[in-house]
Structure formats: structure tokens, C-alpha cells
Amino acid sequence: MTPTTANDSAAPPATDNSQQILDGKQQSFLDVSDPAVLLETWKPAEDGNGTILRLLDFGGTERMVTVRTPSLHLAHVWQTDAVERGQDAISMDGDSQFHFTIHPHQILTLRAVEAIR
């Protein structure tokens, strides 16, 4: 992707109240607090209920990780197995931040469901 100027493309008008226009400030869409944890996958859930985040740990110790989603407001986050079954609630801090414990070299699958606004 190459840099563009404001005149190179025009943003389409918002047609849905659920869309949010970004303010142009530098920030991440998703921020993982631990640099040794990689967001490997972010995809729609197979059953259509939310999105799936798959995180890989490259550290060697068990620790708490925080994920922030400044532009996405979440209703729930659950830990699932690799095929998106089972749901253990993940601790949330407001509607745009959640915390979980990751174990050494773990591949962690989470289901995030956006809040209805």
C-alpha cells in the first residue's frame, strides 16, 4: 500500500449507524500488550457469531495479556477451542479492552462479539 493524499480518494458517506469514521490520529485498530504474543488470525466465526482471534505465544512463561480495541466496542469475549467450540468468559475492562492468561507457547483461540449500538 502506498501513501495517498486526501484528494486521491474520497471516503464513502456513512450509511449505517454502526460505521465509525476514523479520526486520523495514529492508533492501532487492535493492540496486544505483550510483544511476544502474535495475533495470527482474525476472521469471521464459522457459525456467524462474532469474530475469531487466534493468538500465538512466543514467550516462555505464563502471564497476563491485555488486548485493546479502541475502535471496536465489544459485548463479550470468550475462549474457545481451535474449532470454535466451548466458551469460557474472558475478563473485560469496559467495552474495548480484555485480559487473559496465556501459557508458554500456547495457541489461544478467542471469540469476540461486537456490542450492538
Image (cartoon, helix red, strand yellow):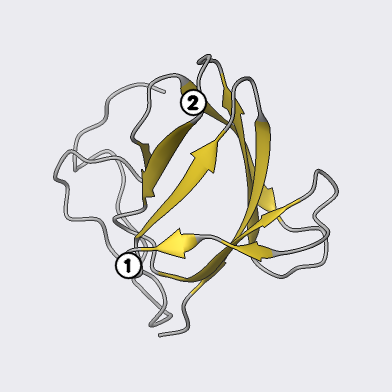
Residue at 37% x, 28% y is 34
Q: Is mark 1 on a helix, strand or loop?
A: loop
**Where the C terminus falls, by quadrant?**
bottom left
Position of residue 23 in the picture relative to residue 113 (left or right): left
Q: What element carries label 2?
A: strand
Which residue is identified by label 2?
37
Position of residue 91 in the picture relative to residue 70 (left or right): right
Check the image and report above or below for 55 versus 35: below
Residue 31 can be seen in this image: yes
Check the image and report above or below for 84 versus 54: below
Q: Where is residue 90 in the image (x, y as percent from the top left)?
A: 53, 60
Separation of disc 2 and disc 1 at Cα?
28 Å
Q: Which-is-in-front pick, marks 2 and 1?
A: 2
Look at label 1 and name its amino acid.
Answer: Gln
Residue at 29% x, 55% y is 70
Q: In which quarter of the image is residue 36?
A: top left
Position of residue 85 in the picture relative to residue 112 (left or right): right
Q: Position of residue 8 (x, y in %)?
A: 27, 38
Look at label 2 and name its amino acid.
Answer: Val
Check the image and report above or below for 48 versus 42: below
Position of residue 96 in the picture relative to residue 90 (left or right): left
Q: Quadrant of residue 64?
A: top left
**Front residue of this view, candidates 63 and 4:** 63
Marks counted in the figure total 2
Q: Where is residue 1 in the image (x, y as percent from the top left)?
A: 42, 23
Which residue is identified by label 1?
20
- Compare marks 2 and 1 and give the one earlier in the sequence: 1
**Front residue of this view, candidates 13 and 25:** 25
**Front residue of this view, candidates 26 and 76:** 76
Check the image and report above or below for 3 versus 111: above
Q: Where is residue 18 in the image (x, y as percent from the top left)?
A: 42, 77
